[in-house]
């Protein structure tokens, strides 16, 4: 299931010949985790809840993401994103900051964040107090361990289930919880059959998604092991770039973050931690 963001143009059914591709031996695809959300700010498990960006999230989507993309002279023909508001708001900031008015945006549920099950809406530190830090980190970072399924009594159960954005997702595949392994299985069909086809024909693609989705794609692209992937942390608003040889279809060069190295390291350390108690009001 896919829909096109009307505010930034539409996908044309005709086959487009990308003139830039004729002069390229390689092409780049950029992965980006959305800016800080209100739930990120309050240290709450978010998942499929449709939290908006915080003020800082909006600011840093411009200050970090747009600045990094412009500094490295990145240009795009097409954006992929999830169905969630925080990703759409990040797309809007980037489109405005890079002066795109007619850029096609493809929105797909397969790029939604991992469903955190019954952890959704709860503070990470409070859950660590209840279940232990080790268990919380297993639920957060392991490859194939599922958090408890979300139950109807969870305050966000109905908000997620009744979100009109999700109405076309088949009931038999609508998740109640997910592991990283299941997110990979969900994302790869879109990545391999749609996104990478665009990249390898020369389209310059930006994927604006979520932390676990970016982890899933990096694991697949780099062949990272199940144990090693637990140590990978994705900062908000920092573009990461992969380059592909258009003849061999193989990746070349290492992944590159388009931000200051010290800033990236600091933000990765922040993401890795369980964090503090909630301050502020839940949305």
Image (spheres, rainbow, N blue to C red):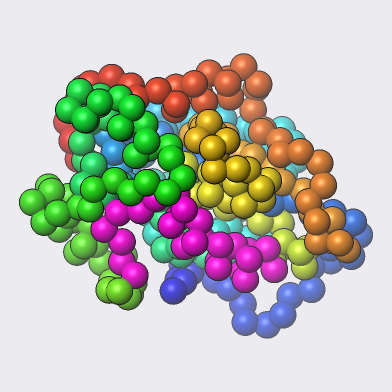
Q: Which residues are magenta?
A: 173-197
Kindly identify the residue that appears in the image at 54 percent across and 37 percent down: 227
Residue 267 at what x, y percent from top left? 50, 23
Front residue (pair 259, 247): 247
Q: Nearer the viewer, residue 139 or 281?
A: 139
The residue sitting at 58% across, 24% down in the picture is 264
Does residue 252 appear anywhere in the picture? Answer: yes
Quadrant where the N terminus lies? bottom left
Asked if residue 37 shows in the view, the reply is: no
Quarter of the picture holding the C terminus: top left
Vertical order, 282 against 147 (above or below) = above
Tell me: residue 37, above or below residue 132.
Answer: below
Q: Which residue is more in the foreground, 56 or 228? A: 228
Q: Main secondary structure of the magenta part?
A: helix
Q: Picture coordinates of residue 62 (x, y %)?
A: 53, 34
Residue 132 picture location, percent across and down: 25, 26
Give the left or right position of residue 53, taking residue 191 as reference.
left
Residue nearest the viewer, comparing 268 with 18: 268
Compared across the picture, whether 172 is left or right of 18 comes to left
54 w.r.t. 8: above or below: above
Residue farthest to the bottom?
A: 14
Residue 10 location in percent, x, y?
54, 71
Marker count (numbered): 0
Q: Residue furthest left?
A: 153
Name which residue lies at 55% across and 66% down.
190
Q: Residue drawn at (82%, 47%), measured in percent from left and top?
A: 252
Q: Is residue 44 left or right of residue 93?
A: left
Query: Per the image, is 138 magenta?
Result: no
């Amino acid at each position: 299931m896919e829909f096109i963001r009307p505010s930034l143009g539409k996908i044309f059914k005709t086959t487009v010949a990308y003139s830039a591709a004729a002069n390229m031996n390689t092409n780049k695809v950029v992965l980006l985790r959305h800016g800080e959300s209100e739930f990120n700010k309050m240290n709450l498990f978010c998942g499929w809840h449709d939290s908006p960006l915080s003020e800082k999230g909006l600011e840093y989507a411009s200050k970090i993401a747009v600045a990094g993309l412009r500094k490295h002279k990145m240009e795009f023909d097409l954006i992929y994103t999830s169905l969630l508001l925080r990703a759409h708001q990040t797309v809007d900031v980037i489109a405005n900051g890079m002066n795109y008015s007619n850029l096609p945006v493809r929105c797909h549920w397969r790029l939604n964040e991992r469903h955190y099950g019954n952890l959704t809406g709860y503070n990470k530190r409070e859950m660590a107090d209840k279940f232990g830090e080790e268990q919380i980190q297993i639920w957060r970072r392991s490859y194939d361990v599922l958090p408890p399924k979300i139950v109807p009594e969870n305050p966000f159960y109905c908000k997620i289930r009744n979100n009109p954005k999700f109405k076309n997702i088949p009931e038999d595949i609508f998740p109640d919880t997910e592991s990283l392994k299941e997110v990979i299985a969900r994302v790869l069909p879109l990545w391999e059959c749609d996104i990478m086809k665009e990249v390898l024909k020369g389209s310059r693609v930006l994927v604006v998604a979520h932390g676990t989705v970016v982890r899933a794609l990096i694991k697949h692209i780099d062949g990272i092991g199940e144990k090693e992937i637990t140590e990978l942390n994705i900062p908000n608003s920092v573009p990461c770039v992969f380059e592909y040889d258009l003849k061999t279809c193989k990746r070349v060069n290492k992944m590159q973050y388009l931000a200051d190295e010290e800033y990236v390291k600091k933000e990765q350390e922040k993401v890795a931690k369980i964090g503090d108690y909630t301050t502020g009001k839940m949305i």
